[in-house]
Image: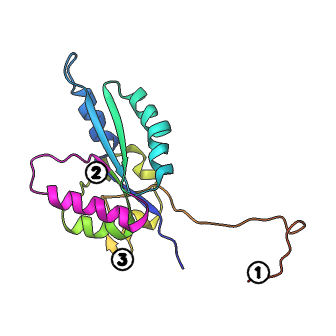
Amino acid sequence: MQRVGIIIVALAAFAIGRLAAAQPAGQQLVMLNLVTAGDQNMVDYVKDYLGPRFEKDHPGVTVRAVGTGPGDAGSQKIYEKLEAEKNNSSWDIDVAVIHQKAAGEMVTKGLLARYVAEVPTAKLVTSEAAKRALGADVDGYVMPMFNSQTAIAYNAMMVSAERYEPDG
């Protein structure tokens, strides 16, 4: 079974950089809202590492991270919020971290910005997941963030390879 990697879907750093650059001195600061379909570790990663680094490089911008829960259920919550706001003049989600399953549907519904061509590092992306997400055309709308796999490692000298059978 193939595990689904997380895809980052965003207005991207170029758009946020433009917001920060366009900010005249003395005006209200820019709040960048990042919503992630990840567990608390992902929220903490943004709050403790990515956000502060971005804020340092973009004075006047504050990054706020909010989690919607892990997996497809978290992505579904983001989808529902964007769908509800699609006719509004402004949205309160600037960056969304979603799973592949949701990316294709969000692209077809017009809920994502086509931003990849504006990102300088886009030319370094080689993953097919940047073009197709579970069969859906997402080229230009997404950039892979993680391609997660889980492995269990153990020291064969310390752990028996025999099948474990719990008592009872």
Task: In the rendered view, tell whether residue 108 sits above or below residue 120.
Answer: below
Distance, label 2 to label 1, CA atoms, is 55 Å
Q: Quadrant of the C terminus?
A: bottom right
- Pointers 1 and 3 in contact (C-beta within 8 Å): no
Quick one: SS at disc 2?
loop
| Of the pair 111 and 137, the residue shown nearer to us | 111
Distance, label 2 to label 3, CA atoms, is 20 Å
Quadrant for residue 142, please give it.
Answer: bottom left
- Give me the residue at 25% from left, 55% from top: 114
- Pointers 2 and 1 in contact (C-beta within 8 Å): no
Residue 57 spot, x, y in % from top left: 41, 28
**Amino acid under disc 1:** Asp
| Of the pair 18 and 78, the residue shown nearer to us | 78
Q: Which numbered tag is attached to residue 167?
A: 1
Magenta stretch bounds: 69-95
N-terminal of the two: label 2 or label 1?
A: 2
Task: In the rendered view, tell whether residue 62 sits above or below residue 150.
Answer: above
Q: Which numbered tag is attached to residue 135?
A: 3
Q: Marks 1 and 3: which is nearer the front?
A: 1
- Give me the residue at 47% from left, 64% from top: 5
Residue that lies at the very extreme toward the front in this rendered image: 168
N-terminal of the two: label 2 or label 3?
A: 2
N-terminal of the two: label 1 or label 3?
A: 3
Task: In the rendered view, tell whether residue 105 sits above or below residue 89.
Answer: below
Please indicate, yes or no, whether residue 111 appears anywhere in the rendered image.
Answer: no
- Give me the residue at 54% from left, 80% from top: 1
- Give me the residue at 19% from left, 67% from top: 109
Check residue 72 for magenta coloring.
yes
Residue ID for mark 2: 115
Please tell me how many numbered marks the rendered image carries: 3
| Of the pair 115 and 98, the residue shown nearer to us | 98
**Amino acid under disc 3:** Gly
